[in-house]
Amino acid sequence: MAGSRLSRLSILQWIGSLVILALSSFLLAIAWSMVEEELRFLAGSRIVTGEVVDHVLVRSQSRGDAQNRAPPAHYPIVRYSTETGKVFQVQAREGYASARSRSAEGGVQSGQDARPVGTPIRVAYRPENPEDARTLGFMQQYFTAIILAITGLVFLLGVVAGLWTTARKSPSA
């Protein structure tokens, strides 16, 4: 009876390990593809310095009461010139939440934007399609991929450590 219970537990551990292993592999594959796509875009791009000319205020689309919604974010609008002198604009991929404080009336007051008008920002664009542009910055380019990769590696290391511990505890036949 005890042997049967032990084998069922062992089977469940293996199934759980395989599920977590699949999840970690999926997260690592997504992270890799995000970095690869970014590097592919940069390989065929020209990099210039643009300038913040305006901001777009984007409000949270989440449902629920106003207290639990994410604060509105300002996305810089960056103007850049191509090698041929044509001028284009692109919205930055990363928004900045306004500094917020509660007023005496309970309302929200917006503070200073993180990237004020006139701030230089690097922009990568495709020479064959200059409207296909992205603002550059480490956080904008790689943050999500890094978080996914770290999460996938933690899951992977957890599976390896769990299986190693289980193998060490099992009696040798």
Image (cartoon, rainbow, N blue to C red):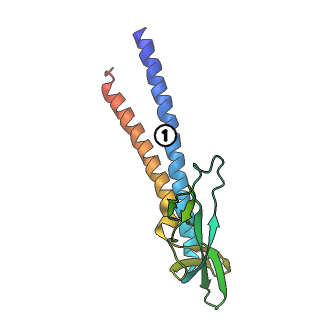
Q: Residue pushed farthest front?
A: 104
| Total count of labels | 1
Q: In this view, does 8 lie above or below 82?
A: above
- Give the percent coordinates (x, y) of residue 153: 43, 48
Q: Is residue 119 above or below residue 169?
A: below
The residue nearer to you, when weighing 111 against 54, is 111
The residue nearer to you, when weighing 59 against 119, is 59
Task: Specify few, some or many for label 1: CA neighbours under 10 Å numbering under 14, 14-19, or 20 or more.
Answer: many
The residue nearer to you, when weighing 117 against 44, is 117
For the point 56% across and 73% down, the residue is: 135
Quadrant of the snapshot with the N terminus: top left
For the point 41% across and 45% down, the residue is: 154
- Give the percent coordinates (x, y) of residue 26: 54, 47
Q: What element carries label 1?
A: helix
Q: Residue pushed farthest bottom?
A: 85
- Give the percent coordinates (x, y) of residue 13: 45, 27
Which residue bears the numbered disc 1?
21
Three-letter residue code for mark 1: Leu
Q: In this view, does 24 lie to the left or right of 172?
A: right
- Give the percent coordinates (x, y) of residue 121: 52, 78
Q: Is residue 128 left or right of residue 118?
A: right
For the point 49% across and 38% down, the residue is: 20
